[in-house]
Image: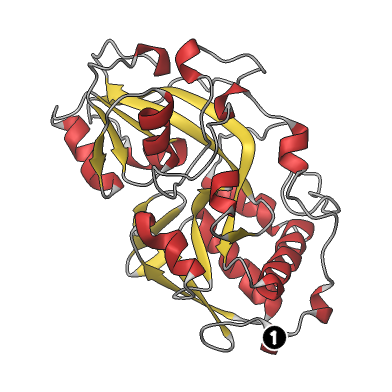
Amino acid sequence: MKKSALKWLTTAPIAVALAFTLAACGGAGTDTGSTGPTDALAGSDQTSLDKYTTDDVTPLDSVKKDELGLVTPGTISVGTLSDAPPNIFLKDGKFTGYDNELLRAMGEKLGLKVEFKSTDFSALLAQVENKQFDVGSSSISTTDARRKNVGFTNGYDFGYMAVVAKTDSDIKGFADLTDKTRIAVITGTVQDDYVTNTLKYEPVRFSDYNTAYANLKNGQVDAWVAPSQQAQGQVKDGDGTVIAEEVVNTQNFTAYAVNSENKALTDALNSALDAVIADGTWSKLTKQWYPERPMPEDWTPGSKAATVPKA
């Protein structure tokens, strides 16, 4: 896999073009409904990270499964994607990836089945809010704008944003993008919002990751602004492409989406998340799916009471 060295940010933006944006992986539409973009790529802020994190969770044995408001009693119905490895994808007819395997483990803690169905990301959050799915699993960055439309669990991951380009391209990072660059994005993602509303460029929008990457490889676009995890899942040796720059973002952790009024299910999932953190499952899956990725020093998953076991 080809990729540049990981680049960590301090509180100063890496370039003027990177200032004042929304955040991380996933997306909910270019019309975010926010009052203004946030400086998501300028580094992490513990106050921002803690703002929506619960102090603790309900004990697992106190969770009442018959009061979770599930579409199908006893089963968590999950909307996810089929083409975004290593987070969420379909392999040999099974939905898998880091996000989905973690959710399966959480379902086991709750004594509930977990059933996945494929959907487009641009529709996912609305489908969760409209109760077509109980949960949305898609490495979703929990921006304030999204919280106006859907609820979220505590965080289980954090995000990167990446620029992917041809190996012989002059594009070496975000600062090299201009209004002349043909920039691919996935419709409805925060990368779409970032290019459109922060950089003020008109991107070339695609409905799925495979098509966006294919158009980069064949030269129809010059660069792809993508969630780093999904970029890593697409870029292969011999493709003539490279992840030119990756930027970590912990201003908004990633979490599972839940209907905004279903506090019982959100609380139950938070309890299960703390449980899989405590028994080492979260650490095991993180190492399995991201063997080379470091963890930000100022962020931990789950509630504020959760403790990640020492390796």
Residue under the image location 49 percent in, 19 percent down: 18
Task: Give the residue drawn at x 53%, y 31%.
Answer: 37
Relative horizontal placement of residue 73, taking residue 189 as reference (left or right): right
Looking at the image, residue 261 lies above or below residue 203: below
Query: Which residue does the image show at 63% across and 14% down from the upper left?
Result: 12
How many tags in the picture?
A: 1
Residue tagged 1? 67
Compared to residue 13, the image places residue 33 above or below, namely below
The quarter of the rendered structure image containing the C terminus is top right
Compared with 161, 77 (above or below) is below
Position of 146 with respect to 279 (left or right) is left
From the viewer's perspective, tell me whether residue 272 is left or right of residue 9.
right
Q: Considering depth in this image, is 304 or 144 the residue closer to the camera?
A: 144
- In the displayed structure, 70 sits above or below 147; it is below
Look at the numbered disc 1 and give the secondary structure of its residue: helix
Give the x, y percent position of residue 283.
68, 50
- Residue 219 in view: yes
Question: Where residue 148 sits in the image (x, y, percent)?
Answer: 57, 54
